[in-house]
Image (tube, rainbow, N blue to C red):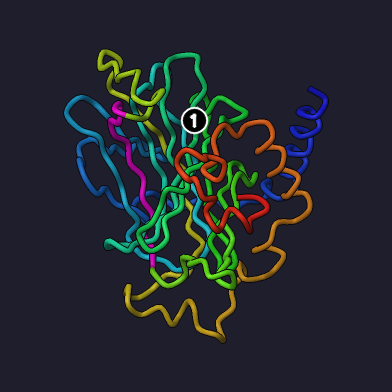
């Protein structure tokens, strides 16, 4: 408890310093549009809601594509019995050899913690899942989920706390996502064949509709004019704020945060799943924190 109290105190101090003057997010329609089941995507003032019922889920996508930068969104997840549902927030390129960075929030029965699954696809290859329980109830208030993508790494953050770092290890012969522009997406759907306790707990449609709420939409990234013209964003003479070492590398404090998250909330890491990977994946042999 002492360690947790210290951690939460530090989180409050960091938020006062770095979050207190944060610029407000854009309106939903400025950055995003409904991508499917438009009648299940509802704008309610500053809040956008995605609805899942037994007829359909729903999703939205960014109006532009990006190469490197930071995307953030505040989400309040499905309340109550959310078993069988998945709410996703992710970046992805297109095609069979696509790159993708995923937040997937796996619903659970009332009173049980939400599980957050992250995954990284590079050139169409994923299977890099990590799962953790959050240190708060994500259904009662909005919390900020962010992806910071630079030439050096991909950092997944919750309320500005890093929960995962996927580093560029091209010097070790490991591909890295750096040459495909990505859109930003979110969706909610029924996945009761796997989402909750491995599919043992099914969606209870008597609790529908299941609603995920969103606000404070932010994209601070390099927008590409077309998915084939990336020169604006990855030229050798181009330099952006996310390229600075003080941003693209974790600070000492952020490293301590990541260690705390992994030690107290990590429940699955593909790097240690010998049943799936008898030979440890190459990137796992080089990452200090994944």
Is residue 216 visible in the rendered image? The answer is no
Quadrant for residue 47, please give it.
Answer: top left
Where does residue 232 sit, x and y in percent of width and height? 45, 80
Residue depicted at x 30% and y 15%: 207
In the rendered image, residue 60, in percent from the top left (x then y), is placed at 31, 47
Q: On the rendered structure, is 126 left or right of 210? A: right
Residue placed at 29% from the left, 20% from the top? 203
Q: Residue furthest left?
A: 55
Kind of element beneath mark 1: strand
Q: Out of 284 and 16, give the one closest to the viewer.
A: 284
In the rendered structure, which segment of residues is drawn in magenta? Answer: 181-193
Left or right: 203 in relation to 289: left
Rendered position, 41 above or below 284: above
Q: Is residue 170 visible?
A: yes
Q: Nearer the viewer, residue 216 or 144?
A: 144
Circle 1 crowding by C-alpha within 10 Å: few under 14, some 14–19, many from 20: many
In the picture as drawn, the residue positioned furthest to the front comes out as 278
* Residue at 49% in and 78% down: 234
Residue shown at 76% from the left, 34% from the top: 7
* Above or below for 201 versus 276: above
Please state if 47 lies on the left or on the right of 171 as rendered. Answer: left
Q: Considering only vertical position in the picture, is 113 above or below 145? A: above
- Residue 166 in which image quadrant: bottom right
> Does 13 appear in magenta?
no
* x and y, in percent, of residue 280 in the image: 54, 50
Question: Magenta part mainly helix, strand or loop?
Answer: strand
Q: What residue would you read off at disc 1? A: 115
| Residue 264 locus on image (x, y percent) | 68, 31
Residue 190 lies within the magenta run: yes
């Amino acid at each position: 408890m002492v360690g947790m109290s210290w951690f939460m105190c530090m989180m409050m101090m960091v938020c006062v310093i770095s979050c207190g003057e944060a610029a407000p997010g854009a309106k939903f329609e400025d950055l995003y549009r409904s991508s499917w089941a438009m009648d299940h995507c509802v704008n309610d003032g500053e809040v956008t809601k995605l609805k899942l019922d037994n007829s359909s889920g729903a999703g939205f996508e960014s109006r532009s594509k990006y190469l490197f930068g930071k995307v953030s969104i505040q989400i309040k997840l499905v309340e109550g019995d959310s078993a069988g549902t998945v709410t996703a927030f992710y970046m992805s390129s297109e095609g069979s050899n696509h790159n993708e960075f995923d937040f997937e929030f796996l619903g659970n029965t009332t009173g049980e913690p939400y599980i957050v699954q992250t995954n990284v696809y590079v050139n169409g290859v994923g299977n890099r899942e990590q799962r953790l329980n959050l240190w708060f109830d994500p259904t009662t208030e909005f919390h900020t989920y962010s992806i910071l993508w630079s030439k050096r790494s991909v950092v997944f953050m919750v309320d500005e706390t890093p929960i995962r770092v996927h580093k560029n290890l091209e010097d070790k012969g490991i591909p890295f996502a750096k040459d495909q522009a990505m859109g930003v997406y979110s969706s909610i759907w029924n996945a009761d064949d796997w989402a909750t306790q491995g599919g043992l707990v099914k969606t209870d449609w008597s609790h529908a509709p299941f609603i995920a709420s969103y606000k404070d939409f932010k994209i601070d990234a390099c927008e590409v004019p077309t998915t084939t013209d990336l020169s604006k964003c990855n030229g050798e003479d181009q330099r952006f704020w996310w390229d600075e070492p003080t941003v693209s590398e974790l600070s000492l404090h952020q490293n301590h945060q990541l260690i705390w998250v992994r030690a107290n909330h990590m429940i699955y890491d593909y790097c240690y799943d010998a049943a799936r990977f008898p030979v440890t994946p190459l990137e796992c042999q080089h990452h200090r924190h994944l």
